[in-house]
Image (spheres, helix red, strand yellow):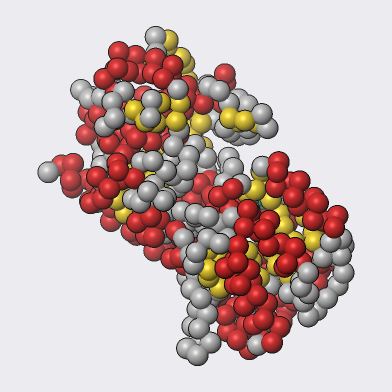
Amino acid sequence: MKILIATSEALPFAKTGGLADICGILPEALINLGTDVHVILPKYKCIPTPNKQVGTIKVQIGEKEKKGIVWEETTPNGVKFLFIQHNPYFNRDELYGDKDGDYDDNAERFFFFSRAVIETLKLLDWQPDVIHIHDWQTALVPLLLKTTYKKSSYARIPTIFTIHNLAYQGVFPTEKLYLFGDLGVELFTMDKLEFYGQINFMKGAFRFADILTTVSKQYAREIQTVQYGCGVEGCLVERQKNLYGIINGIDYNEWNPSTDKYIYKNYSNQNLLTKRENKNKLIKEANLKPSNNSPLLGMVTRLADQKGLDLLATIIDDVLNMDVRFILLGTGDRKYHELFVGLAEKYKDKVGINLKFNNTIAHKIYAGSDIFLMPSRFEPCGLGQLICLKYGTVPIVHRTGGLADTVTEFDPIAGKGNGFVFISYRAEEFLASIKRAIYTFSYKPDEFKRIQINGMQGNFSWENSAKEYIELYHRAISNVSI
Ligand code: ADP
Protein backbone atom coordinates (compact mmCIF):
# COMPACT_ATOMS: atom_id res chain seq x y z
CA MET A 1 0.00 0.00 0.00
CA LYS A 2 1.33 3.41 -0.97
CA ILE A 3 0.46 6.28 1.36
CA LEU A 4 1.12 9.97 0.88
CA ILE A 5 1.06 11.97 4.11
CA ALA A 6 0.61 15.70 3.52
CA THR A 7 1.24 17.91 6.52
CA SER A 8 2.44 21.36 7.49
CA GLU A 9 4.89 20.04 10.07
CA ALA A 10 6.75 16.83 10.82
CA LEU A 11 9.77 15.84 12.85
CA PRO A 12 12.70 15.84 12.39
CA PHE A 13 12.26 18.88 10.10
CA ALA A 14 9.74 21.38 11.47
CA LYS A 15 7.78 21.47 14.71
CA THR A 16 5.51 23.82 16.59
CA GLY A 17 3.39 21.21 18.38
CA GLY A 18 2.14 17.67 18.68
CA LEU A 19 1.25 17.46 14.97
CA ALA A 20 4.97 17.33 14.17
CA ASP A 21 5.55 14.44 16.57
CA ILE A 22 2.74 12.49 14.99
CA CYS A 23 3.66 13.13 11.37
CA GLY A 24 7.26 12.27 12.22
CA ILE A 25 6.61 8.94 13.87
CA LEU A 26 3.44 7.65 12.17
CA PRO A 27 5.27 7.17 8.82
CA GLU A 28 7.92 5.04 10.51
CA ALA A 29 5.31 2.93 12.23
CA LEU A 30 3.46 2.48 8.91
CA ILE A 31 6.67 1.49 7.13
CA ASN A 32 7.42 -1.05 9.86
CA LEU A 33 4.06 -2.60 9.04
CA GLY A 34 5.07 -3.06 5.43
CA THR A 35 3.56 -0.02 3.72
CA ASP A 36 5.31 2.45 1.42
CA VAL A 37 5.07 6.03 2.72
CA HIS A 38 6.02 9.46 1.40
CA VAL A 39 5.61 12.58 3.50
CA ILE A 40 5.22 15.97 1.85
CA LEU A 41 5.65 19.32 3.57
CA PRO A 42 6.60 22.93 2.81
CA LYS A 43 10.29 23.71 2.72
CA TYR A 44 10.57 26.22 5.53
CA LYS A 45 13.67 28.24 6.30
CA CYS A 46 14.59 25.85 9.13
CA ILE A 47 14.86 22.94 6.67
CA PRO A 48 18.25 22.62 4.93
CA THR A 49 18.03 22.24 1.16
CA PRO A 50 18.22 18.53 0.31
CA ASN A 51 20.62 17.27 -2.37
CA LYS A 52 18.04 15.77 -4.67
CA GLN A 53 15.76 17.99 -6.72
CA VAL A 54 12.72 16.17 -8.10
CA GLY A 55 11.56 18.90 -10.45
CA THR A 56 9.50 22.04 -10.67
CA ILE A 57 5.76 22.60 -10.52
CA LYS A 58 3.41 25.38 -11.47
CA VAL A 59 0.63 26.17 -9.05
CA GLN A 60 -2.37 28.23 -10.06
CA ILE A 61 -3.61 30.45 -7.28
CA GLY A 62 -6.28 32.92 -8.29
CA GLU A 63 -5.22 34.49 -11.57
CA LYS A 64 -1.56 33.89 -10.95
CA GLU A 65 0.71 30.99 -11.54
CA LYS A 66 3.45 30.43 -8.98
CA LYS A 67 6.45 28.21 -9.26
CA GLY A 68 7.49 25.60 -6.77
CA ILE A 69 10.59 23.43 -6.56
CA VAL A 70 10.18 19.91 -5.24
CA TRP A 71 13.01 18.36 -3.24
CA GLU A 72 13.46 14.90 -1.85
CA GLU A 73 15.28 13.44 1.11
CA THR A 74 15.16 10.08 2.84
CA THR A 75 15.68 10.11 6.59
CA PRO A 76 17.99 7.59 8.30
CA ASN A 77 14.80 5.84 9.42
CA GLY A 78 13.82 5.21 5.82
CA VAL A 79 11.01 7.75 5.41
CA LYS A 80 10.99 9.58 2.09
CA PHE A 81 10.22 13.28 2.51
CA LEU A 82 9.23 15.62 -0.30
CA PHE A 83 9.55 19.36 0.25
CA ILE A 84 7.84 22.12 -1.69
CA GLN A 85 9.97 25.20 -1.96
CA HIS A 86 8.43 28.58 -2.67
CA ASN A 87 10.55 31.13 -0.86
CA PRO A 88 8.10 34.06 -0.71
CA TYR A 89 5.71 31.86 1.27
CA PHE A 90 7.86 29.53 3.28
CA ASN A 91 11.33 30.95 3.71
CA ARG A 92 10.39 32.65 6.98
CA ASP A 93 11.55 32.38 10.57
CA GLU A 94 8.30 30.87 11.82
CA LEU A 95 5.81 28.36 10.43
CA TYR A 96 2.52 30.20 10.87
CA GLY A 97 3.19 33.61 12.37
CA ASP A 98 5.35 35.64 14.69
CA LYS A 99 4.78 37.50 17.92
CA ASP A 100 2.51 39.98 16.13
CA GLY A 101 0.14 37.13 15.27
CA ASP A 102 -0.56 34.84 12.34
CA TYR A 103 0.93 35.75 8.98
CA ASP A 104 -1.78 37.54 7.01
CA ASP A 105 -1.20 35.44 3.90
CA ASN A 106 -1.69 32.05 5.58
CA ALA A 107 -4.69 31.38 3.31
CA GLU A 108 -2.46 31.88 0.25
CA ARG A 109 0.42 29.90 1.75
CA PHE A 110 -1.59 26.80 2.53
CA PHE A 111 -3.85 27.01 -0.49
CA PHE A 112 -0.63 27.00 -2.47
CA PHE A 113 0.75 24.07 -0.50
CA SER A 114 -2.46 21.99 -0.85
CA ARG A 115 -2.52 22.50 -4.59
CA ALA A 116 1.21 21.88 -4.81
CA VAL A 117 0.69 18.48 -3.18
CA ILE A 118 -1.48 17.46 -6.14
CA GLU A 119 0.80 19.07 -8.75
CA THR A 120 3.74 17.15 -7.27
CA LEU A 121 2.01 13.87 -8.14
CA LYS A 122 2.59 14.74 -11.81
CA LEU A 123 6.33 14.64 -11.21
CA LEU A 124 6.50 11.31 -9.45
CA ASP A 125 6.66 7.82 -10.88
CA TRP A 126 5.12 6.78 -7.57
CA GLN A 127 1.36 7.24 -7.16
CA PRO A 128 -0.34 6.94 -3.78
CA ASP A 129 -3.23 4.57 -3.11
CA VAL A 130 -4.40 6.95 -0.43
CA ILE A 131 -3.62 10.49 0.69
CA HIS A 132 -3.65 11.19 4.42
CA ILE A 133 -3.95 14.89 5.22
CA HIS A 134 -3.75 16.69 8.55
CA ASP A 135 -5.43 19.78 10.00
CA TRP A 136 -6.64 22.88 8.17
CA GLN A 137 -3.37 23.55 6.38
CA THR A 138 -3.94 20.61 4.02
CA ALA A 139 -7.72 20.34 4.35
CA LEU A 140 -8.33 21.66 0.83
CA VAL A 141 -6.66 18.69 -0.87
CA PRO A 142 -9.86 16.55 -1.11
CA LEU A 143 -11.90 19.54 -2.28
CA LEU A 144 -9.36 20.40 -4.97
CA LEU A 145 -9.24 16.76 -6.11
CA LYS A 146 -13.02 16.63 -6.43
CA THR A 147 -13.42 20.04 -8.11
CA THR A 148 -10.43 21.61 -9.85
CA TYR A 149 -8.87 18.21 -10.62
CA LYS A 150 -12.10 16.26 -11.07
CA LYS A 151 -11.27 15.22 -14.63
CA SER A 152 -7.80 13.94 -13.73
CA SER A 153 -6.96 10.43 -12.57
CA TYR A 154 -6.00 11.89 -9.19
CA ALA A 155 -9.65 12.62 -8.42
CA ARG A 156 -10.14 8.96 -7.58
CA ILE A 157 -7.41 8.80 -4.95
CA PRO A 158 -9.15 8.31 -1.60
CA THR A 159 -8.41 10.79 1.14
CA ILE A 160 -8.32 10.57 4.91
CA PHE A 161 -8.42 13.75 6.93
CA THR A 162 -7.20 13.82 10.54
CA ILE A 163 -8.35 16.56 12.88
CA HIS A 164 -5.63 17.19 15.45
CA ASN A 165 -7.30 20.22 16.94
CA LEU A 166 -10.71 21.50 15.91
CA ALA A 167 -10.00 24.86 17.52
CA TYR A 168 -7.89 25.82 14.50
CA GLN A 169 -10.01 25.52 11.35
CA GLY A 170 -8.32 27.90 8.93
CA VAL A 171 -11.02 30.57 8.81
CA PHE A 172 -10.41 33.51 6.48
CA PRO A 173 -12.34 36.53 5.18
CA THR A 174 -14.23 36.30 1.90
CA GLU A 175 -11.54 38.35 0.11
CA LYS A 176 -9.57 35.11 -0.04
CA LEU A 177 -12.20 33.47 -2.26
CA TYR A 178 -10.18 34.77 -5.21
CA LEU A 179 -7.77 31.90 -4.55
CA PHE A 180 -10.30 29.44 -5.96
CA GLY A 181 -10.64 31.31 -9.26
CA ASP A 182 -13.95 30.71 -11.05
CA LEU A 183 -14.98 28.10 -8.48
CA GLY A 184 -15.06 30.62 -5.64
CA VAL A 185 -18.75 31.47 -5.85
CA GLU A 186 -19.85 27.87 -6.23
CA LEU A 187 -17.79 26.78 -3.22
CA PHE A 188 -19.04 29.55 -0.96
CA THR A 189 -22.16 27.78 0.29
CA MET A 190 -23.01 26.45 3.71
CA ASP A 191 -22.55 22.81 2.70
CA LYS A 192 -19.05 23.56 1.42
CA LEU A 193 -16.73 26.33 2.65
CA GLU A 194 -19.00 29.08 3.96
CA PHE A 195 -18.88 29.55 7.74
CA TYR A 196 -20.72 32.52 9.25
CA GLY A 197 -19.82 34.73 6.32
CA GLN A 198 -16.20 33.57 6.16
CA ILE A 199 -14.27 30.83 4.39
CA ASN A 200 -13.44 27.75 6.44
CA PHE A 201 -10.72 25.51 4.97
CA MET A 202 -11.48 22.58 7.27
CA LYS A 203 -15.04 22.44 5.99
CA GLY A 204 -13.56 21.48 2.62
CA ALA A 205 -12.32 18.25 4.16
CA PHE A 206 -15.49 17.62 6.16
CA ARG A 207 -17.40 17.66 2.92
CA PHE A 208 -14.97 16.00 0.50
CA ALA A 209 -12.60 13.68 2.39
CA ASP A 210 -13.62 10.02 2.27
CA ILE A 211 -12.85 9.35 5.91
CA LEU A 212 -12.44 11.69 8.86
CA THR A 213 -10.47 10.82 11.93
CA THR A 214 -9.43 12.52 15.09
CA VAL A 215 -6.89 11.61 17.71
CA SER A 216 -8.96 9.96 20.43
CA LYS A 217 -12.30 8.19 20.60
CA GLN A 218 -13.58 10.55 23.27
CA TYR A 219 -12.68 13.64 21.21
CA ALA A 220 -14.42 12.07 18.19
CA ARG A 221 -17.61 12.00 20.27
CA GLU A 222 -17.09 15.41 21.85
CA ILE A 223 -16.63 17.31 18.61
CA GLN A 224 -20.12 16.32 17.56
CA THR A 225 -21.53 18.38 20.45
CA VAL A 226 -22.18 22.11 20.74
CA GLN A 227 -19.80 22.33 23.70
CA TYR A 228 -16.74 21.06 21.82
CA GLY A 229 -17.80 21.31 18.18
CA CYS A 230 -16.41 24.83 17.58
CA GLY A 231 -19.40 25.69 15.40
CA VAL A 232 -18.96 22.79 12.95
CA GLU A 233 -20.57 20.05 15.06
CA GLY A 234 -23.40 19.83 12.52
CA CYS A 235 -21.01 18.94 9.69
CA LEU A 236 -19.38 16.31 11.87
CA VAL A 237 -22.65 14.74 12.94
CA GLU A 238 -23.49 14.45 9.25
CA ARG A 239 -20.25 12.53 8.68
CA GLN A 240 -20.69 10.45 11.85
CA LYS A 241 -20.52 7.11 10.02
CA ASN A 242 -17.12 7.97 8.63
CA LEU A 243 -15.66 9.70 11.67
CA TYR A 244 -13.21 7.63 13.73
CA GLY A 245 -11.02 8.20 16.78
CA ILE A 246 -7.49 6.77 16.82
CA ILE A 247 -5.34 7.62 19.80
CA ASN A 248 -1.82 8.90 19.15
CA GLY A 249 1.13 6.96 20.41
CA ILE A 250 4.45 8.28 21.57
CA ASP A 251 7.92 7.47 20.36
CA TYR A 252 9.38 5.22 23.03
CA ASN A 253 12.82 5.54 21.42
CA GLU A 254 12.78 9.16 22.46
CA TRP A 255 10.61 8.95 25.57
CA ASN A 256 11.97 6.18 27.74
CA PRO A 257 13.39 6.84 31.22
CA SER A 258 15.72 3.85 31.04
CA THR A 259 17.53 5.12 27.92
CA ASP A 260 16.79 8.87 27.88
CA LYS A 261 20.02 10.79 27.18
CA TYR A 262 18.71 14.14 28.40
CA ILE A 263 17.89 13.20 31.98
CA TYR A 264 20.30 13.14 34.91
CA LYS A 265 19.95 9.47 35.76
CA ASN A 266 18.20 6.64 33.94
CA TYR A 267 15.64 4.51 35.76
CA SER A 268 12.81 2.07 35.19
CA ASN A 269 9.93 0.66 37.20
CA GLN A 270 12.46 -1.76 38.73
CA ASN A 271 14.43 1.03 40.41
CA LEU A 272 12.00 3.85 40.89
CA LEU A 273 14.01 5.30 43.76
CA THR A 274 16.55 6.49 41.19
CA LYS A 275 13.86 8.77 39.80
CA ARG A 276 14.40 10.86 42.93
CA GLU A 277 17.91 11.81 41.78
CA ASN A 278 16.31 13.44 38.76
CA LYS A 279 13.98 15.34 41.05
CA ASN A 280 16.74 16.56 43.34
CA LYS A 281 18.96 17.73 40.47
CA LEU A 282 16.07 19.46 38.76
CA ILE A 283 15.16 21.30 41.96
CA LYS A 284 18.78 22.29 42.46
CA GLU A 285 19.19 23.52 38.88
CA ALA A 286 16.05 25.61 39.29
CA ASN A 287 17.48 27.13 42.50
CA LEU A 288 14.57 25.99 44.61
CA LYS A 289 14.77 25.03 48.25
CA PRO A 290 15.65 21.33 48.41
CA SER A 291 13.06 19.02 49.83
CA ASN A 292 12.83 15.26 49.71
CA ASN A 293 9.39 15.01 51.18
CA SER A 294 7.40 17.64 49.35
CA PRO A 295 6.03 16.67 45.95
CA LEU A 296 7.34 18.35 42.82
CA LEU A 297 4.53 19.36 40.48
CA GLY A 298 5.54 19.75 36.82
CA MET A 299 4.02 21.20 33.68
CA VAL A 300 5.23 21.25 30.07
CA THR A 301 2.77 23.03 27.88
CA ARG A 302 1.87 25.67 25.36
CA LEU A 303 0.69 28.65 27.37
CA ALA A 304 -2.73 28.86 25.72
CA ASP A 305 -6.27 29.05 27.10
CA GLN A 306 -6.91 25.50 25.90
CA LYS A 307 -4.47 24.15 28.46
CA GLY A 308 -6.54 24.99 31.54
CA LEU A 309 -4.30 27.79 32.74
CA ASP A 310 -7.29 29.87 33.83
CA LEU A 311 -8.14 27.14 36.34
CA LEU A 312 -4.54 26.96 37.42
CA ALA A 313 -4.39 30.73 37.90
CA THR A 314 -7.44 30.57 40.20
CA ILE A 315 -5.99 27.97 42.56
CA ILE A 316 -2.23 28.29 42.25
CA ASP A 317 -1.84 30.32 45.46
CA ASP A 318 -3.74 27.63 47.39
CA VAL A 319 -1.43 25.02 45.91
CA LEU A 320 1.75 26.94 46.57
CA ASN A 321 0.75 27.57 50.15
CA MET A 322 1.01 23.83 50.66
CA ASP A 323 4.36 22.08 51.00
CA VAL A 324 5.12 21.63 47.28
CA ARG A 325 7.54 22.66 44.56
CA PHE A 326 6.35 23.69 41.10
CA ILE A 327 8.30 23.77 37.82
CA LEU A 328 6.83 24.88 34.52
CA LEU A 329 8.19 24.91 30.98
CA GLY A 330 6.09 26.70 28.43
CA THR A 331 5.69 29.53 26.02
CA GLY A 332 2.71 31.29 24.49
CA ASP A 333 0.22 33.96 25.55
CA ARG A 334 1.70 37.03 27.18
CA LYS A 335 -0.86 37.06 30.01
CA TYR A 336 0.38 33.66 31.17
CA HIS A 337 4.02 34.70 30.88
CA GLU A 338 3.19 37.54 33.25
CA LEU A 339 1.31 35.25 35.61
CA PHE A 340 4.23 32.85 35.94
CA VAL A 341 6.90 35.53 36.21
CA GLY A 342 4.86 36.98 39.09
CA LEU A 343 4.61 33.59 40.78
CA ALA A 344 8.34 32.95 40.48
CA GLU A 345 8.99 36.28 42.22
CA LYS A 346 6.42 35.68 44.93
CA TYR A 347 7.45 32.09 45.71
CA LYS A 348 11.19 32.19 45.04
CA ASP A 349 11.99 28.99 46.92
CA LYS A 350 9.16 26.98 45.47
CA VAL A 351 8.55 27.97 41.87
CA GLY A 352 10.80 27.47 38.84
CA ILE A 353 9.67 28.90 35.52
CA ASN A 354 11.13 28.41 32.03
CA LEU A 355 9.32 30.53 29.46
CA LYS A 356 10.77 28.98 26.35
CA PHE A 357 10.62 25.94 24.10
CA ASN A 358 13.33 23.51 25.13
CA ASN A 359 13.30 19.79 24.55
CA THR A 360 16.07 18.98 27.05
CA ILE A 361 14.31 20.75 29.91
CA ALA A 362 11.07 19.03 28.89
CA HIS A 363 12.71 15.62 29.34
CA LYS A 364 14.12 16.66 32.72
CA ILE A 365 10.72 17.83 33.96
CA TYR A 366 8.96 14.67 32.81
CA ALA A 367 11.58 12.61 34.64
CA GLY A 368 12.05 14.75 37.75
CA SER A 369 8.46 15.63 38.66
CA ASP A 370 6.33 13.52 40.99
CA ILE A 371 3.04 14.85 39.66
CA PHE A 372 2.18 16.34 36.26
CA LEU A 373 -0.63 18.87 35.81
CA MET A 374 -2.71 18.78 32.63
CA PRO A 375 -6.04 20.48 33.37
CA SER A 376 -6.85 21.18 29.68
CA ARG A 377 -10.27 22.64 28.96
CA PHE A 378 -10.29 20.33 25.93
CA GLU A 379 -7.58 18.01 24.64
CA PRO A 380 -7.88 16.15 21.32
CA CYS A 381 -5.29 13.58 22.42
CA GLY A 382 -2.48 15.11 24.43
CA LEU A 383 1.07 13.83 24.49
CA GLY A 384 2.17 15.24 27.83
CA GLN A 385 0.14 12.75 29.87
CA LEU A 386 1.36 9.82 27.75
CA ILE A 387 4.96 10.85 28.26
CA CYS A 388 4.67 11.42 31.99
CA LEU A 389 2.95 8.04 32.46
CA LYS A 390 6.03 6.37 30.96
CA TYR A 391 8.25 8.33 33.36
CA GLY A 392 6.35 7.30 36.48
CA THR A 393 5.13 10.87 36.91
CA VAL A 394 1.54 10.83 38.03
CA PRO A 395 -0.83 12.89 35.86
CA ILE A 396 -3.71 15.01 37.11
CA VAL A 397 -6.07 15.63 34.21
CA HIS A 398 -9.48 17.02 33.30
CA ARG A 399 -11.68 14.21 31.95
CA THR A 400 -11.83 15.32 28.34
CA GLY A 401 -10.73 14.06 24.91
CA GLY A 402 -7.59 11.95 24.90
CA LEU A 403 -7.01 12.62 28.59
CA ALA A 404 -10.25 10.77 29.34
CA ASP A 405 -9.19 7.85 27.14
CA THR A 406 -5.75 7.42 28.69
CA VAL A 407 -5.84 8.47 32.36
CA THR A 408 -8.07 6.82 34.93
CA GLU A 409 -8.55 7.79 38.56
CA PHE A 410 -6.69 5.54 40.97
CA ASP A 411 -8.90 3.14 42.89
CA PRO A 412 -7.02 2.20 46.09
CA ILE A 413 -9.13 -0.88 46.71
CA ALA A 414 -8.65 -2.45 43.29
CA GLY A 415 -5.12 -1.01 42.95
CA LYS A 416 -6.09 0.11 39.45
CA GLY A 417 -5.80 3.49 37.75
CA ASN A 418 -2.84 5.57 36.66
CA GLY A 419 -3.60 9.12 37.83
CA PHE A 420 -6.09 11.59 39.21
CA VAL A 421 -9.03 12.88 37.20
CA PHE A 422 -11.45 15.74 37.74
CA ILE A 423 -14.73 15.64 35.90
CA SER A 424 -16.21 19.15 35.65
CA TYR A 425 -14.03 21.94 34.41
CA ARG A 426 -14.07 23.84 37.70
CA ALA A 427 -11.24 25.26 39.78
CA GLU A 428 -12.46 23.63 43.02
CA GLU A 429 -12.51 20.23 41.36
CA PHE A 430 -9.03 20.70 39.99
CA LEU A 431 -7.79 21.76 43.42
CA ALA A 432 -9.48 18.77 45.05
CA SER A 433 -7.73 16.41 42.65
CA ILE A 434 -4.37 18.03 43.40
CA LYS A 435 -5.06 17.59 47.11
CA ARG A 436 -5.88 13.90 46.56
CA ALA A 437 -2.61 13.44 44.71
CA ILE A 438 -0.55 15.29 47.34
CA TYR A 439 -2.23 13.36 50.13
CA THR A 440 -1.45 10.05 48.43
CA PHE A 441 2.13 11.12 47.78
CA SER A 442 2.67 12.22 51.37
CA TYR A 443 0.72 9.66 53.38
CA LYS A 444 0.23 6.60 51.16
CA PRO A 445 3.60 6.05 49.48
CA ASP A 446 2.79 2.45 48.57
CA GLU A 447 -0.35 3.53 46.77
CA PHE A 448 1.52 6.33 45.05
CA LYS A 449 4.11 3.82 43.85
CA ARG A 450 1.32 1.55 42.56
CA ILE A 451 -0.06 4.45 40.49
CA GLN A 452 3.40 5.18 39.10
CA ILE A 453 3.95 1.57 38.11
CA ASN A 454 0.49 1.24 36.60
CA GLY A 455 1.33 4.23 34.41
CA MET A 456 4.75 2.91 33.42
CA GLN A 457 3.25 -0.42 32.41
CA GLY A 458 0.77 1.14 29.99
CA ASN A 459 1.54 0.88 26.30
CA PHE A 460 0.87 3.83 24.03
CA SER A 461 3.25 2.85 21.27
CA TRP A 462 2.58 3.80 17.68
CA GLU A 463 2.28 0.25 16.42
CA ASN A 464 -1.32 -0.19 17.55
CA SER A 465 -2.41 3.18 16.21
CA ALA A 466 -0.67 2.62 12.88
CA LYS A 467 -2.54 -0.68 12.48
CA GLU A 468 -5.83 1.14 12.98
CA TYR A 469 -4.87 3.72 10.34
CA ILE A 470 -4.00 0.96 7.88
CA GLU A 471 -7.42 -0.57 8.42
CA LEU A 472 -9.01 2.76 7.58
CA TYR A 473 -6.82 3.22 4.50
CA HIS A 474 -8.10 -0.15 3.29
CA ARG A 475 -11.65 0.93 3.97
CA ALA A 476 -11.16 4.20 2.09
CA ILE A 477 -9.63 2.40 -0.88
CA SER A 478 -12.40 -0.19 -1.09
CA ASN A 479 -15.14 2.44 -0.72
CA VAL A 480 -13.77 4.42 -3.61
CA SER A 481 -13.41 1.46 -5.90
CA ILE A 482 -16.97 0.21 -5.25
P1 ADP B 1 -0.31 20.51 21.76
O1 ADP B 1 0.01 19.82 20.47
O2 ADP B 1 -1.74 20.96 21.90
O3 ADP B 1 0.66 21.59 22.13
P2 ADP B 1 0.35 17.95 23.01
O4 ADP B 1 0.30 17.51 24.44
O5 ADP B 1 -0.40 17.10 22.03
O6 ADP B 1 -0.16 19.45 22.96
O7 ADP B 1 1.85 18.02 22.49
C1 ADP B 1 2.75 18.95 22.98
C2 ADP B 1 4.17 18.45 22.75
O8 ADP B 1 5.05 19.57 22.77
C3 ADP B 1 4.63 17.53 23.87
O9 ADP B 1 5.59 16.64 23.30
C4 ADP B 1 5.30 18.48 24.86
O10 ADP B 1 6.27 17.84 25.64
C5 ADP B 1 5.93 19.48 23.90
N1 ADP B 1 6.08 20.84 24.45
C6 ADP B 1 5.11 21.73 24.73
N2 ADP B 1 5.64 22.88 25.18
C7 ADP B 1 6.97 22.71 25.20
C8 ADP B 1 8.09 23.54 25.56
N3 ADP B 1 7.92 24.79 25.99
N4 ADP B 1 9.33 23.05 25.42
C9 ADP B 1 9.52 21.77 24.98
N5 ADP B 1 8.52 20.94 24.62
C10 ADP B 1 7.26 21.40 24.73
Pick whichever, 186 or 356, lies toward us. 186
Residue at 42% over, 10% down: 64
The residue sitting at the top extreme is 63
* Residue 287 found in image quarter: bottom right
Taking 385 as reference, is 264 left or right? Answer: right
Q: How many marks?
A: 0
Image location (x, y in percent) of residue 147: 25, 24
Residue at 82% over, 56% down: 344
* Residue 466 found in image quarter: bottom left
Image location (x, y in percent) of residue 277: 77, 74
* Residue 365 found in image quarter: bottom right
Residue at 74% over, 50% down: 339
Is residue 124 at all visible to an observer of this figure?
no
Taking 309 as reference, is 60 left or right? Answer: left
Taking 345 as reference, is 127 left or right? Answer: left
Give the quadrant of the C terminus: top left
Residue at 59% over, 72% down: 433
Taking 163 as reference, is 260 left or right? Answer: right
Pick whichever, 434 or 50, lies toward us. 434
Pick whichever, 350 or 255, lies toward us. 350
The residue sitting at the left extreme is 482
Image location (x, y in percent) of residue 401: 44, 58
Compared to residue 417, the image places residue 373 above or below, namely: above
Is residue 406 at all visible to an observer of this figure?
yes
Image location (x, y in percent) of residue 314: 67, 58
